[in-house]
Image (cartoon, grey):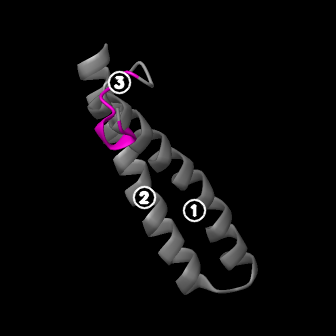
């Protein structure tokens, strides 16, 4: 079986479920990174960049919340 045809035999989790879990984790992880980046920009006095990272953080938080809700609905 080719890796591009993985349907859960290797991971033990169906691709669509694995993808949703991965997406949710990535969004939440990105939200944490954006906090660090925003603080770095703010410390350097660059409010425009700090605001940019805060907006990106907000979008990542939204993705994480949506992913968590969908996971709870489908896997709970």
Name the residue: 33% across, 33% down: 6
Residues drawn in magenta: 2-9
Residue 66's disc number: none
Residue 61 lies left or right of residue 70; in this view the side is: right
Circle 3 is placed at which residue position?
8
Is residue 5 shown in magenta?
yes
Q: Earlier in the sequence, mark 2 or mark 3?
A: 3
Q: Residue furthest right?
A: 43
Circle 2 crowding by C-alpha within 10 Å: few under 14, some 14–19, many from 20: some
Q: Nearer the viewer, mark 2 or mark 3?
A: 3
Q: Earlier in the sequence, mark 1 or mark 3?
A: 3
State how far apart marks 1 and 2 are (Cα): 9 Å
Residue 48 lies left or right of residue 66; in this view the side is: right
Asked if residue 46 is positioned above or below residue 43 in the image, the reply reads: below
Residue 34's disc number: 1
Circle 2 is placed at which residue position?
58
Q: Secondary structure at mark 1?
A: helix
Name the residue: 61% across, 58% down: 33
């Amino acid at each position: 079986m080719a890796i591009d045809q993985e349907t859960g035999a290797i991971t033990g989790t169906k691709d669509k479920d694995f993808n949703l879990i991965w997406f949710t984790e990535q969004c939440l992880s990105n939200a944490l990174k954006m906090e660090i980046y925003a603080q770095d920009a703010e410390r350097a006095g660059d409010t425009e960049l700090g605001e940019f990272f805060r907006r990106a953080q907000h979008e990542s938080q939204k993705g994480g919340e949506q992913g968590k809700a969908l996971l709870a609905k489908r896997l709970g």
